[in-house]
Amino acid sequence: AQTVTQSQPEMSVQEAETVTLSCTYDTSENNYYLFWYKQPPSRQMILVIRQEAYKQQNATENRFSVNFQKAAKSFSLKISDSQLGDTAMYFCAFMKWVGSNTDKLIFGTGTRLQVFP
Amino acid sequence: DAGITQSPRYKITETGRQVTLMCHQTWSHSYMFWYRQDLGHGLRLIYYSAAADITDKGEVPDGYVVSRSKTENFPLTLESATRSQTSVYFCASSARREETQYFGPGTRLLVL
C-alpha cells in the first residue's frame, strides 16, 4: 500500500523569504503522479503543482517549485518570495498512474504554513 | 465559469437522519470523487465514479451511498447519520483518472 508522510505539522516563514515543505512517500510503483494541494482558511482545496514520475525535470509554477527525488521517494515543495496569502495547510498527495483498481489520491496529513509580515 | 459546487455548505443534523450532500460540476469531467477530511487523517476517499452509472468504493465507504445518473451530478447520501460522520466533505472531479482533481469548496457536516 502506498503511504505519504509529511513530517512537519507546522512551519512558519517571514514574508518574502523562502520555505521548503517536506514530503516522502512509499510505493513499489514506477509510474505515478505527485501533487501539492493548498487549503487556505476558506477550506477549498487548490492544486498548487503536479509532477509526473516519469519526468526528470522538476515542476515549477511561478513561485512554487518542487524537488523530486524519485530514488529517495521525496517530493518537497519550495515556496519562494512567500506572501501572506500563502498561509494555508499544504497537502502532499500521490496517485498511481495506470493499472490501478482505485486510482485514488493518497494524502499526507498536511503541513500548516504561517507566513508572517 | 462555475466549476464545481457543493451544497449545502453547512449542515447540522441528528443521529439517525438521512442526509444528502450535493455535488455539481460544469466541466463534463468523467471522474468524480467524494472525500472526507478529519483531523489527523488528512483526506480519505469515500466513493468515486468513473462515469455516469459507474461507481466504486474508496477507503471509507461504510454508511454512505452514492449515485450518478448524470455526468454533472454526484450526490452523497448518509442513510442513517452517526456522530462519527461529523466531518468536512469534499467533492472533486477530473477529466481522466490520471488527471488533476479539482475540488469543490466543501460541506461542513455536524451530526448531533
Image (cartoon, rainbow, N blue to C red):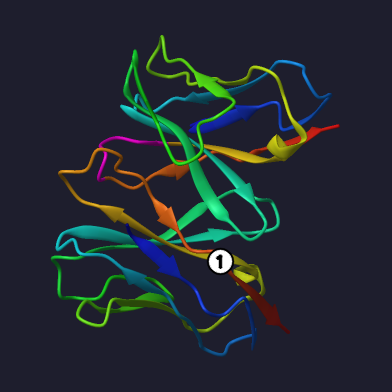
> Does the magenta portion include A108?
no
Question: What is the magenta range?
Answer: B93-98
Q: Nearer the viewer, residue A57 or A109?
A: A109
Up the image or down, B67 lies above or below A81; here it is: above
Task: Look at mark 1 in the image and give the residue it sits on.
Answer: A110
On screen, residue B34 versus residue A29, left or right, reads right
Q: Amino acid at mark 1?
A: Gly
Q: Could you tell whether B109 is left or right of A48 in the image?
A: right
Q: Position of residue A33 (x, y in %)?
A: 26, 58
Q: Residue at x 39, y 44 (%)?
A: B101
Residue sitting at x 58%, y 87%:
A16
Of residues B107 and B77, the one drawn nearer to the viewer in this rendering: B77
- Which residue is more in the foreground, A22 or B65? B65
Q: How many marks?
A: 1
Residue A31, given in percent of the width and then of the height, sits at 16, 59
User: Measured from the top left, where is residue A68 in percent x and y?
Assistant: 28, 77
Q: Position of residue B81 (x, y in %)?
A: 72, 24
Say which of B12 and A61 sits in front: B12
